[in-house]
Image (cartoon, grey):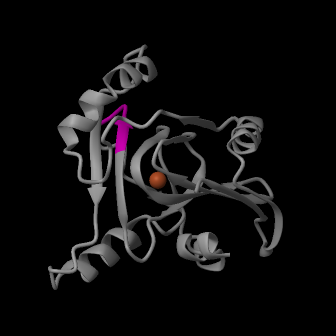
Protein backbone atom coordinates (compact mmCIF):
# COMPACT_ATOMS: atom_id res chain seq x y z
CA UNK A 1 0.00 0.00 0.00
CA UNK A 2 1.45 3.32 -1.05
CA UNK A 3 1.16 5.70 1.87
CA UNK A 4 1.77 9.38 2.52
CA UNK A 5 2.13 10.77 6.02
CA UNK A 6 2.91 14.43 6.66
CA UNK A 7 4.17 15.36 10.12
CA UNK A 8 5.47 18.51 11.80
CA UNK A 9 9.26 18.47 11.55
CA UNK A 10 9.54 19.24 15.28
CA UNK A 11 6.98 16.66 16.45
CA UNK A 12 6.36 13.36 14.70
CA UNK A 13 3.15 12.92 16.73
CA UNK A 14 1.69 15.99 14.99
CA UNK A 15 0.33 14.11 11.97
CA UNK A 16 -1.12 16.63 9.54
CA UNK A 17 -2.12 14.22 6.82
CA UNK A 18 -2.16 10.47 6.27
CA UNK A 19 -3.56 9.01 3.09
CA UNK A 20 -3.29 5.96 0.87
CA UNK A 21 -5.30 7.55 -1.94
CA UNK A 22 -2.97 7.60 -4.98
CA UNK A 23 -4.59 10.71 -6.47
CA UNK A 24 -4.27 12.63 -3.20
CA UNK A 25 -0.68 11.44 -2.71
CA UNK A 26 0.25 12.67 -6.19
CA UNK A 27 -1.48 16.02 -5.66
CA UNK A 28 0.14 16.62 -2.28
CA UNK A 29 3.58 15.80 -3.62
CA UNK A 30 3.05 17.91 -6.76
CA UNK A 31 2.21 20.88 -4.50
CA UNK A 32 5.69 20.46 -3.08
CA UNK A 33 7.34 20.09 -6.52
CA UNK A 34 8.09 16.42 -5.91
CA UNK A 35 7.70 14.10 -8.87
CA UNK A 36 5.60 11.03 -8.14
CA UNK A 37 4.33 8.62 -10.75
CA UNK A 38 2.86 5.13 -11.10
CA UNK A 39 4.04 2.74 -13.80
CA UNK A 40 1.91 -0.27 -14.76
CA UNK A 41 3.03 -3.69 -13.56
CA UNK A 42 4.76 -5.91 -16.11
CA UNK A 43 3.12 -9.24 -16.94
CA UNK A 44 4.52 -11.84 -14.57
CA UNK A 45 6.32 -9.22 -12.48
CA UNK A 46 7.28 -10.29 -9.01
CA UNK A 47 10.39 -9.92 -6.94
CA UNK A 48 12.01 -12.97 -8.55
CA UNK A 49 12.01 -11.39 -12.02
CA UNK A 50 15.61 -11.02 -13.22
CA UNK A 51 17.06 -7.52 -13.43
CA UNK A 52 17.56 -7.69 -17.20
CA UNK A 53 13.88 -8.56 -17.73
CA UNK A 54 12.75 -5.70 -15.51
CA UNK A 55 14.90 -3.19 -17.38
CA UNK A 56 13.77 -4.58 -20.74
CA UNK A 57 10.12 -4.59 -19.66
CA UNK A 58 10.23 -0.94 -18.64
CA UNK A 59 12.50 0.25 -21.45
CA UNK A 60 9.86 2.55 -22.97
CA UNK A 61 9.06 4.18 -19.63
CA UNK A 62 12.73 4.54 -18.82
CA UNK A 63 13.44 6.09 -22.23
CA UNK A 64 10.53 8.51 -21.73
CA UNK A 65 11.78 9.56 -18.30
CA UNK A 66 15.25 9.98 -19.73
CA UNK A 67 14.19 11.69 -22.97
CA UNK A 68 16.72 14.48 -22.44
CA UNK A 69 19.52 12.02 -21.71
CA UNK A 70 19.96 13.44 -18.24
CA UNK A 71 20.50 10.09 -16.57
CA UNK A 72 23.74 8.53 -17.69
CA UNK A 73 23.44 5.53 -15.36
CA UNK A 74 20.39 3.35 -14.85
CA UNK A 75 20.67 0.27 -12.68
CA UNK A 76 18.66 -1.97 -10.41
CA UNK A 77 19.19 -2.29 -6.66
CA UNK A 78 17.53 -5.25 -4.98
CA UNK A 79 17.50 -6.89 -1.60
CA UNK A 80 15.40 -9.85 -0.49
CA UNK A 81 15.24 -11.76 2.76
CA UNK A 82 17.36 -14.91 2.73
CA UNK A 83 16.75 -16.82 5.95
CA UNK A 84 19.03 -19.63 4.76
CA UNK A 85 22.00 -17.25 4.97
CA UNK A 86 23.19 -16.74 8.56
CA UNK A 87 24.86 -13.51 7.46
CA UNK A 88 21.69 -12.01 6.05
CA UNK A 89 20.43 -10.15 9.16
CA UNK A 90 23.75 -8.29 9.50
CA UNK A 91 23.86 -7.57 5.80
CA UNK A 92 20.28 -6.27 5.87
CA UNK A 93 20.93 -4.12 8.94
CA UNK A 94 24.04 -2.60 7.37
CA UNK A 95 22.19 -1.81 4.14
CA UNK A 96 19.33 -0.30 6.13
CA UNK A 97 21.53 1.87 8.32
CA UNK A 98 23.40 3.35 5.40
CA UNK A 99 20.71 5.85 4.46
CA UNK A 100 18.64 6.14 7.62
CA UNK A 101 20.47 9.28 8.66
CA UNK A 102 19.48 12.59 7.14
CA UNK A 103 21.44 13.48 4.02
CA UNK A 104 21.13 15.14 0.63
CA UNK A 105 22.49 14.66 -2.85
CA UNK A 106 23.80 17.02 -5.52
CA UNK A 107 21.35 15.48 -7.99
CA UNK A 108 17.74 14.29 -7.85
CA UNK A 109 17.35 10.85 -6.24
CA UNK A 110 15.07 9.03 -8.66
CA UNK A 111 13.77 5.58 -7.76
CA UNK A 112 11.20 3.34 -9.38
CA UNK A 113 10.05 0.49 -7.16
CA UNK A 114 9.32 -2.43 -9.46
CA UNK A 115 8.47 -4.60 -6.44
CA UNK A 116 8.65 -4.57 -2.66
CA UNK A 117 8.75 -1.35 -0.69
CA UNK A 118 10.73 1.36 1.03
CA UNK A 119 10.03 4.70 2.68
CA UNK A 120 11.46 8.10 1.81
CA UNK A 121 11.28 10.88 4.38
CA UNK A 122 11.62 14.35 2.93
CA UNK A 123 12.52 17.07 5.40
CA UNK A 124 10.88 20.19 4.00
CA UNK A 125 10.37 23.58 5.67
CA UNK A 126 8.32 22.90 8.82
CA UNK A 127 7.39 19.34 7.92
CA UNK A 128 8.53 15.81 7.26
CA UNK A 129 6.81 14.10 4.35
CA UNK A 130 7.03 10.30 4.57
CA UNK A 131 6.23 8.38 1.38
CA UNK A 132 5.98 4.61 1.57
CA UNK A 133 6.64 3.47 -2.00
CA UNK A 134 5.39 0.10 -3.20
CA UNK A 135 5.76 -1.80 -6.46
CA UNK A 136 4.78 0.53 -9.31
CA UNK A 137 5.73 3.80 -7.58
CA UNK A 138 8.27 6.28 -8.89
CA UNK A 139 9.54 9.06 -6.66
CA UNK A 140 12.12 11.75 -7.24
CA UNK A 141 13.72 13.46 -4.25
CA UNK A 142 14.82 16.88 -5.54
CA UNK A 143 18.55 17.67 -5.44
CA UNK A 144 19.58 19.35 -2.21
CA UNK A 145 16.51 18.18 -0.28
CA UNK A 146 17.24 16.87 3.19
CA UNK A 147 15.89 13.31 3.42
CA UNK A 148 16.47 9.81 4.67
CA UNK A 149 15.32 6.35 3.59
CA UNK A 150 14.16 3.31 5.51
CA UNK A 151 13.99 -0.11 3.87
CA UNK A 152 12.56 -1.68 7.04
CA UNK A 153 13.55 -4.56 9.28
CA UNK A 154 13.23 -7.10 6.48
CA UNK A 155 14.43 -5.26 3.38
CA UNK A 156 12.60 -6.58 0.35
CA UNK A 157 12.57 -4.52 -2.81
CA UNK A 158 13.60 -4.19 -6.43
CA UNK A 159 14.27 -0.57 -7.39
CA UNK A 160 15.41 0.98 -10.66
CA UNK A 161 17.80 3.84 -9.94
CA UNK A 162 18.61 6.78 -12.19
CA UNK A 163 21.84 8.74 -11.86
CA UNK A 164 23.32 11.72 -13.63
CA UNK A 165 26.74 10.81 -12.27
CA UNK A 166 28.10 7.42 -11.32
CA UNK A 167 28.61 8.57 -7.72
CA UNK A 168 25.21 10.31 -7.55
CA UNK A 169 24.03 7.92 -4.83
CA UNK A 170 26.66 9.15 -2.36
CA UNK A 171 25.05 11.14 0.44
CA UNK A 172 26.15 14.39 2.05
CA UNK A 173 25.14 13.65 5.65
CA UNK A 174 23.79 16.59 7.63
CA UNK A 175 24.61 15.16 11.08
CA UNK A 176 21.03 15.86 12.19
CA UNK A 177 19.55 12.88 14.09
CA UNK A 178 15.99 13.83 13.13
CA UNK A 179 15.40 10.41 11.55
CA UNK A 180 15.53 8.77 14.98
CA UNK A 181 12.49 10.77 16.11
CA UNK A 182 10.18 9.62 13.33
CA UNK A 183 8.31 6.36 12.82
CA UNK A 184 10.16 3.66 10.90
CA UNK A 185 8.80 2.12 7.71
CA UNK A 186 7.46 -0.83 9.72
CA UNK A 187 5.77 1.47 12.24
CA UNK A 188 4.21 3.62 9.55
CA UNK A 189 2.74 0.65 7.75
CA UNK A 190 1.46 -0.96 10.97
CA UNK A 191 -0.19 2.23 12.28
FE1 LIG B 1 19.32 9.68 -0.51
Q: How many marks?
A: 0
* The one of 172 and 7 positioned closer to us in this rendering: 7
Which residue of the protein is positioned furthest toward the top in this rendering?
A: 68
Image quadrant occupied by the N terminus: bottom right
Is residue 90 visible to us here?
A: yes
Which residue of the protein is positioned furthest toward the bottom in this rendering?
A: 86
* Residue 12 locus on image (x, y percent): 75, 73
* The one of 22 and 98 positioned closer to us in this rendering: 22
22 to 6, vertically: above or below: above
Quarter residue 174 falls in: bottom right
Q: Is residue 86 left or right of residue 1?
A: left
Q: Is residue 16 left or right of residue 37?
A: right
184 to 156, vertically: above or below: below
Is residue 166 visible to us here?
A: no
Q: Which residues are magenta?
A: 160-165
Image quadrant occupied by the C terminus: bottom right
* Residue 28 locus on image (x, y percent): 76, 43
* Residue 107 locus on image (x, y percent): 47, 38
Which residue occupies 54% across, 64% down?
Answer: 102
Q: Main secondary structure of the magenta part?
A: strand
Magenta span includes 60: no
* The one of 125 and 29 positioned closer to us in this rendering: 29
Which residue occupies 24% across, 28% down?
Answer: 56
* Residue 111 locus on image (x, y percent): 44, 43
Magenta span includes 163: yes
Which residue occupies 72% across, 39% down?
Answer: 23
Which residue occupies 67% across, 43% down?
Answer: 22
Quarter residue 176 falls in: bottom right
180 to 79, vertically: above or below: below
Amino acid sequence: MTLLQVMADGDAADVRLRTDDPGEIGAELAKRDIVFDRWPALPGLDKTMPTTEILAGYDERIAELNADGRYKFVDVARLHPDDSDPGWPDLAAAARDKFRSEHRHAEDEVRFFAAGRGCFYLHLPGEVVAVVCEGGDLLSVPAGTRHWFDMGERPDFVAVRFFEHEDGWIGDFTGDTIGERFPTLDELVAA
